[in-house]
Image (spheres, rainbow, N blue to C red):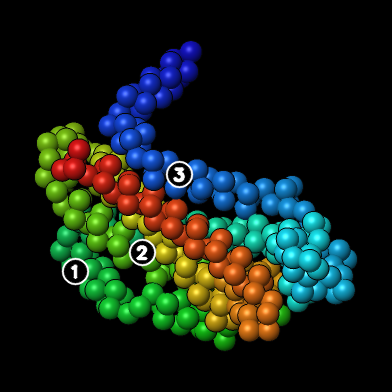
Amino acid sequence: MKSVARIQDTVHRFFDSDIWYSFKKSKVTIAAACVTAIMILSAFTAPWIAPHNTFDPATLDLMDAFTPPAWYEDGTSKFLLGTDDQGRDIFSTILYGSRISLFVAFASMLLAMLLGVSLGLVSGYLGGAIESIIMRIADVQISFPAILIVLLISGVARSVLPNVRHEEMAIWVLIFAIGISSWVPFARTVRGSTMVEKNKEYVQSARVIGRRRATIMFRHILPNVMGPVLVIGTIGLAVAVLTEATISFLGVGVPPTEPSLGTLIRIGQSFLFAGEWWIVIFPGVALAILVLAVNLLGDWMRDALNPKLR
């Protein structure tokens, strides 16, 4: 009963908070949240709501290739947005492709957050040589474009892994590469916040009663520095989706057997000037809408969590 009452109290305080008021007041933010939620739910429920299973070769028919959208004279209601060069339904491939793109983006941002927050806490709290080493590494990495770091890690992984494992490990290599290229903003932000928090009275009290350093960092300081981390993570999610699409468009990301939005765009651009515009336009529009919606949510969250703007 106590846990239920605590949950109810937390929910009540959230709906009375300035953040919820700011959310309700912004129609753009509400629209962005709805679009993001619909696209995420559609992507992760693709096996149940997609009209066709684009990963099952037995369901594909090359005679259906290059079928235009349903509103064309040669179109059919069976393929609402048309088909690609292999006869795959474009609408279904967008759902499945969004699923892969979002999985890569979420997993890579989680890796970047875990690495960046941990290194930021350690460097900000301990200081000294450890802080200097971590921050110099961060300074060096931030001087290189993230796309180059991802390409470098992907290239090294392809040269180390056996050829038979390339497609099997491609998604995990891409997650690792994007995560490693994205930890610096988390680390720099958490380091600055930690340097402020560690001089406050509650941290001094924890030291006096003999709390261990790890306990102070992760149990006391971490909850008080998570606001900026959530903002960076939300905006970084949109960047990760674009990075994955760029890498897959270049042909070194997700394998063709598991097409993401970037892979679909790469395949479709080959037929753009032949008149089959729908193969590239619809995945491109889906990618643009997803990135725009997530970016709008990130902008709202940044303003809502900024006490100076309340």
Q: State the SS at label 3.
A: helix
Rounded to the nearest angstrom, the CA distance separating label 1 from label 3 is 43 Å
Which of discs 2 and 1 lies nearer the camera? The answer is 2
Position of the C terminus by quadrant: top left
Question: In the rendered structure, which amino acid carries the disc numbered 1?
Answer: Ser
Which residue does the image show at 20% across and 50% down from the upper left?
194
Q: Is residue 252 above or below residue 227?
A: below
Residue 5 visible (yes or no): yes
Which residue does the image show at 78% across and 70% down from the upper left?
67
- Residue 195 rendering spot, x and y as whole percentages: 16, 52
Q: Is residue 81 left or right of residue 104?
A: right
Q: State the SS at label 2.
A: loop
Which of discs 1 and 3 lies nearer the camera? The answer is 3
Q: Which mark is residue 132?
A: 1
Rounded to the nearest angstrom, the CA distance separating label 2 from label 3 is 29 Å
Q: Which residue is mark 3?
A: 31
